[in-house]
Amino acid sequence: RYFKHNPMKSLVDFFEENVQKYSSNPYMWEKRDGAFQSTSYSELKELVYRFAAGMMTLGIQKGDRLALLAEGRTHWVVAEMGMFYLGAIDVPLSIQLNEPADLTFRLIHSGARMVVTSASQAKKINAIKDDINSLDLTSISGLVFMGGPYSVYDEHSWLNDESQLIKNAIDADILIMGVCLGAQLVSKALGAKVCKAEYMETGWHMIETDTSKLGHLHPLKLEKNFEVFEWHEDVFTLPEGATPIFSGSNHENQGYVLGKILVMQFHLEMTEHMVNDWLEQYQSCLPAPSPSVQTPQQINERLNERLNDLHRHADIIYDWWLNHKA
């Protein structure tokens, strides 16, 4: 009888209703680092929103088909729910597909525009990348290259592929954003130098903005100084022709604009879940506390307040990047 009187209810509707009812309740439990840890309804909703926003930035639209090849874990749910929010069509692929021909057949004949995959399954896609359609940049509005626990000089085949994609995107003159590792990869592709910093930078740090030299570009209205989240040990120089707009006291080059390219060394996308997850996963990699390296206690101090301010600036910067024309 419920469905008879509510024929238009969707999984998204049900999810939103239950987030309201059970916001802080565990949605899923997942074993990480030897112990089961939960992700609450509200945390999952935040992850889903950010995944969907990222897909929108990449030009994914209602009706697009996205292949999903990953283990059944929290991020799998985030990816599928994000597709539902966009009105995209999920093409689920079993991780038991080990024959390259089987995987190639399904990807080609499904009409999938993109493959979303876990790190452990990515090697299967890399093995058949020459047999499936390459990314058509003419149908892409912009590309965002995010961070990760790697260096631009690490010897991973996928890093070479990503570097080539960045070069192709630069040649195609489409919108590009680089964040942390992504910023370093974009900078390297533009001819800048990327190297290990004298000291690591983690936690909350003030940066200074200077948008006075953006010239004919759409105005970017930001406060003179605001706090961002940092987590990096590599730095980049400015490529030729770049306009620096963000600078820091620990590491000077924090971001620049070059044509339709926006590069930021820092992270605007952080959530409470991400902050605590990084502290848990990478705490053993952190050097002793210093002016550039904060303790977990310092990082968690006024966390919600800081995140709200971070996201306020993120909205301004992302909107500007999406709407400006070089």
Image (cartoon, helix red, strand yellow):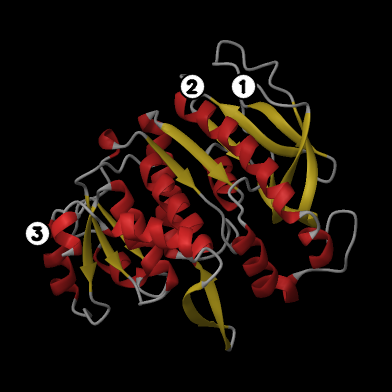
Mark 3 or 1 closer to N-term? 3
Residue holding disc 2: 324
The answer to whether the residues at label 1 and label 2 have Cβ atoms under 8 Å apart is: yes
Query: As displayed, is residue 120 above or below residue 11?
Result: below
Res 228 → quadrant: top right
Amino acid found under the numbered disc labelled 1? Leu
Residue holding disc 1: 220
Which quadrant of the figure contains the N terminus? bottom left
**Image location of residue 225, percent across then percent down:** 79, 32
Determine if residue 257 is in view. Answer: yes
Mark 1 or 2 closer to N-term? 1
View extreme (right): residue: 290
The answer for how far apart the CA atoms under marks 3 and 2 are is: 37 Å
Query: As displayed, is residue 35 above or below residue 151?
Result: below
Camera-nearest residue between 83 and 238: 83
**Image location of residue 224, percent across then percent down:** 78, 26
Camera-nearest residue between 153 and 126: 126
The answer for how far apart the CA atoms under marks 1 and 2 are is: 9 Å
Residue holding disc 3: 109
Amino acid found under the numbered disc labelled 2? His
